[in-house]
Amino acid sequence: MNCIDFERHLNDLFGAAGLPHAAETPSHATQCPRCRETWERFRLLHEATDLWRKQTPEVDLSRAVVRSLSLPQSRLAPGDKIDSHSSGSAARDARARPRAAERAARGGLREDFSLRRRTLLATLAAAALLFALGLAWQFWRNEPAGGQMARRADPIADPAPRELDPQRAGLPDAEPDLPDPAPYRDLVQQATGALGDVAAFVMPGSNGSMPRGGEERTSADWIDGLQHQLRPIGRSLEDAFDFLWQAGESADRTRT
Amino acid sequence: VSDDGELVRGCLAGDEKSLCEFVRRFQTAVFGLCFRMLSHREDAEDVAQESFLRAFRNLHRWDAARPLLPWLLTIAANRCRSWLARRVERGLPADFADEIPDRRSRQTRLDLAEELQLGLEMLREEYRACFVLFHFNELTLSEIASVTGHAEGTIKTWLHRARKELAEHLQRRAVVPSISHELH
């Protein structure tokens, strides 16, 4: 018998009829120090297991279990959690057992923790809902404003005033709030007559000296400049309307 | 009521005496498993009670051709496993330290059984279950295999490792005296 066989034999002995007493030590263990130590350890484990088995406390669960069965909670569907603290717990049933109060307090702590966790989850859910509502409100509120901003940023897409659009001039006036275009038209005619055509207009923000691909516009027609909010070159004016304003004043001076 | 089948029939009929008898007949095995697995008496009582309640709810599913105890121990072992998992999540119970001897105090001389239980706590859960089912509940290897859902060979290996680790634990804790006596 070698050491491996000995350990296997020892394990079988332990599992079956229990270890024999030291007096019946297998012959291999008397010659091999390592196996003798293993033998000692297993012999003591065997002794400890005997004691350990006998030291299991006695308990009577029958009353508590039967009482729990009579409670409605015990008739839950299989797989449901049984709250042993609220039903007829065996631990609660044994009133004479020590530390019952501590145990009840521990149960209370668990319930308290559970309540706290539920409260925290509810708060988080409410905060998330409020945040989502806020986002939705902002989106709803900004959508029309954004559209307006987009329309402002794109003068080409902005339709010309009805009175300045030759294609729409003959259509019936659907926007009664607009001011009477007649004086404005007169002003334009006077300015045109006094100053003639403007040499060039550029997009707002451009200095006009360095044309950039496709962005700059040149026009001899000031109406085009006004319509597309272009800027007259070399006149230190912000837009075509200022130009028209000065042109009007100039026309008045000429007339007088 | 002597026969398990007859006892189960009485329980299914709602006979209170049969229910009490059922609990009394198996409570030592069920509670012992729970107590040795959880190392905490009150937790073990709760889990044992919960195991009986689950067993009663599922009693109609029990196969009368098979022994009742391993079926019941399967439920208890599963409940212990769930309880241990929950214990990891929520931490040890407040009075756990009172139940188990102080593992750090080497000056405290524990008896062999306490040292063994201490060693059991340090084992892998599977090893511990095998050891308890074999040495406390006295199930055979095939019955343990059916309770735990593992192959019999695996159970044999786990059992051997459990014994080896426990024996080493006893030696580390200086419970095993150095070899001083004569072997004959």
Image (cartoon, coloured by chain):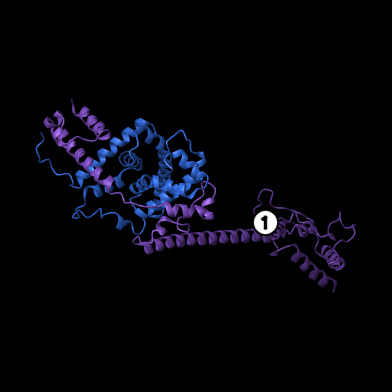
Chain colours: A purple, B blue
Residue B116, horizontal then vertical, whole percent: 25, 46
Task: State the count of labels.
Answer: 1
Residue A196, horizontal then vertical, whole percent: 81, 61
Q: Which residue is mark 1?
A: A208
Residue at left offset 26%, top offset 46%: A52
Q: Is residue B4 left or right of residue A191?
A: left
Q: Residue furthest top?
A: A1
- Of the 4 image quadrants, the one containing the N terminus of chain B is top left
- Nearest the viewer among A252 and A35 is A35
> Which amino acid is tagged 1?
Gly
Can residue A149 be seen? yes
Q: Is A23 situated above or below A242?
A: above
Q: Is residue B111 left or right of residue B159?
A: left
Mark 1 neighbour density, 10 Å: few (under 14) some (14–19) many (20 or more) = some
Residue at left offset 84%, top offset 59%: A162
Residue B25, horizontal then vertical, whole percent: 39, 45
Q: Is residue A142 left or right of residue B99?
A: right
